[in-house]
Amino acid sequence: MTFTQLVLASHNAGKLKELQAMLGDSVHLRSIGEFSSVEPEETGLSFVENAILKARNASRISGLPALADDSGLAVDFLGGAPGIYSARYADGQGDAANNAKLLDALKDVPEAERGAQFVCVLALVRHAEDPLPILCEGLWHGRILTAASGEHGFGYDPLFWVPERNCSSAELDPIQKNQLSHRARAMAILRQRLSLQ
Ligand SMILES: O=P(O)(O)OP(=O)(O)OP(=O)(O)OC[C@H]1O[C@@H](n2cnc3c(O)ncnc32)[C@H](O)[C@@H]1O
Ligand SMILES: [Mg+2]
């Protein structure tokens, strides 16, 4: 399978930047924002279901093959929450409110119990009714900090401690994050599946 352009089924500018950097110049990622400002309702109960739903919707709207990223943060102490609801954790009030709610939910929880993983599922469909979407998953293990730290990235990055680098993921520069992250791991699998090496 070869693609010179894909529509990215995401309204999240942080994802577009990271995914385009990982894909390199061979594939141009076009934002679904060029075609529509309406975001589909993420009605699935899993990352996989939501990724497929977003990819099909973007392909239907654009007439192009589509790549979707459904991702989030699964916190051990919270039984995997906020999970697929990560973007909506504080009822749509945005990243700062999500982070504040998470800090509050883990107030007084000791370091040893603050384990968490970022999850990313990428889904690629060749067309809206594609019966065989390509699915790739990546996990990134870390810990939730007790206060925000760092300015890079987006979302929960300031609260996510990266043990292999001894800093938060918002303290990593974009090149480093793109070598380690859940999204990088899922993208490495996708690149292999597409023979993009
Ligand atoms: O659905 P689209 O339009 O792609 O954009 P979104 O931001 O709503 O994306 P998701 O539904 O996949 O929700 C993912 C949320 O998980 C968080 N997240 C995912 N990847 C992250 C990363 O690399 N760093 C920090 N937070 C991340 C962040 O809060 C995202 O808003
Ligand atoms: Mg979303």
Image (cartoon, rainbow, N blue to C red):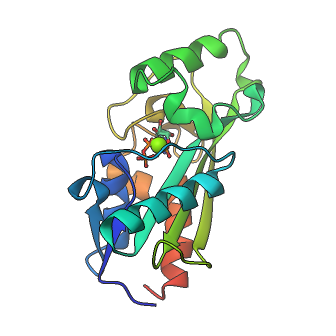
Which of these two is toward me, 176 or 27? 27
Q: Is residue 191 visible?
A: yes
Q: Residue at x 56, y 61 (%)?
A: 52
Quarter of the figure with the C terminus: bottom left
Q: Residue at x 49, y 34 (%)?
A: 87
Q: Is residue 34 left or right of residue 135?
A: left
Q: Residue at x 58, y 48 (%)?
A: 164
Q: Is residue 31 above or below residue 158?
A: below
x then y, percent, for residue 112: 76, 26
Q: Is residue 76 above or below residue 60?
A: above
Dividing the picture into quadrants, the one containing residue 161 is top right
Which of these two is toward me, 173 or 136? 136
Dividing the picture into quadrants, the one containing residue 139 is bottom right
Q: Is residue 172 above or below residue 19?
A: above
x then y, percent, for residue 57: 44, 60
Number of numbered labels in the structure image: 0
Q: Is residue 170 left or right of residue 136?
A: left
x then y, percent, for residue 41: 50, 42
x then y, percent, for residue 30: 26, 65
Q: Is residue 139 visible?
A: no
Q: Residue at x 65, y 10 (%)?
A: 107
